[in-house]
Image (spheres, grey):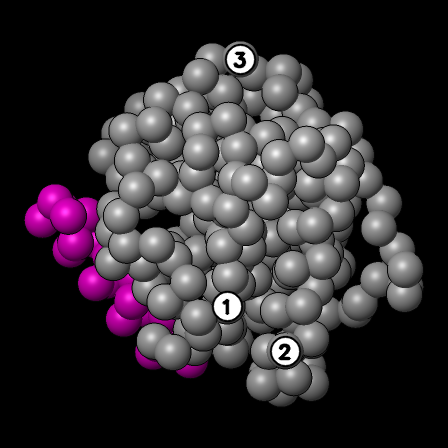
Amino acid sequence: MRPWYRFCRVLCQLGFVLLFRGRVFGARNVPRRGPVVLACNHQSFLDPVLATVAVPRECHFMARDTLFRSPRFRRLIEALNAFPVRRGSADLAAVKETLRRLRAGAVVTAFPEATRTPDGALQPMRGGVLLMARKAGAPLVPTLIFGAFEAWPRGARLPRPAPILVAYGEPIWPDQLEGLPETAAADLLRQRLEGLLRRYGGLLPRRARPPRPPPGTRAMEPAAAID
């Protein structure tokens, strides 16, 4: 881990604990070496930091291309291993870059919902990231971020203190995705995230619990290209 990355990580860990009373579960489920995809739900702008705050490896981030428009901010996030992806289109350059980093043994953080939730609930998953993980031979770690919607909901200019937890599920290995169509792979990921929500969601105060989707709802979209 580079000193610059380690320094930023320590600052983020302090903020996670002091401002958000952060708790982490299942960090041992993230492999310590080799390629990994952290497949996260998307609750707030804080999510890239929250998803990786407990991972003792440098992580890489798929980030929407509009974040790279400011030269200063671009230099910052590129120094922290972010790379751009165009939303709503088949971004072949982003696909190739993701595969390149995975094949080099990196941890790549991705958000299959593609955009932040409007209400705190899980949104439809897209299967493109899962298929890239399978192609690169990388395990997929379902990563639940919970409470961040209350800390920084859509429409709010700044975050506010609120309890947040992050939970890592057991990896989904490439052979478990073999032969699965895109929608089935996305459904498997959603089931794993829902399982983490059932297991850990009750640990936060009631006001920090987002509304849950109706039972049996599994709408899918086509893919875009401490304890």
Q: Amino acid at mark 1?
A: Ala
> Is 130 located above or below residue 40 in the figure?
above
Q: Quadrant of the C terminus?
A: bottom left
Q: Residues within 10 Å of mark 1 (few under 14, many from 20)?
A: many
Circle number at residue 115 = none
Rounded to the nearest angstrom, the CA distance separating label 3 from label 1 is: 31 Å
Image position, residue 210 (x, y; %): 72, 69
Residue to which mark 2 is pinned:
199
**Image point (72%, 58%), residue name:** 191
Q: Circle 2 sits in a helix, a strand or a loop, which is it?
A: helix
Query: Would you identify the image quadrant in which residue 12 lies?
Result: bottom left
Residue 167: which numbered mark, if any?
1
Q: Quadrant of residue 9?
A: bottom left
Dominant secondary structure of the residues highlighted in magenta in the image: helix
Residue 48, placed above or below residue 130: below
Q: Which residue is mark 3?
A: 92
Given residues 18 and 85, the one toward you in this image is 85
From which residue to which does the magenta span run?
1-22
Residue 150 in view of the camera = no
- The image position of residue 161, as x and y in percent, is 48, 74
The amino acid type of the residue labelled 3 equals: Leu
Residue displayed at 33% across by 64% down:
54
Residues under numbered marks 1 and 2 in contact, where contact means CB atoms less than 8 Å apart = yes
Q: How far apart are the two marked residues, 3 and 2, measured between alpha carbons?
A: 37 Å
Q: Is residue 50 left or right of residue 125?
A: left
> Is the residue marked by circle 3 packed among few (<14), some (14-19), or many (20+) residues within 10 Å?
few
Residue at the spot 59% in from the left edge and 78% down from the top edge:
200
How many angstroms separate mark 1 from mark 2 (CA)? 10 Å
Q: Nearer the viewer, residue 171 or 24?
A: 171
Q: Position of residue 95 (x, y in %)?
A: 50, 20
- Please tell me which of labels 1 and 2 falls first in the chain: 1
Assess disc 2: are there few (<14), some (14-19) or many (≥20) residues with their C-alpha within 10 Å of its C-alpha. few
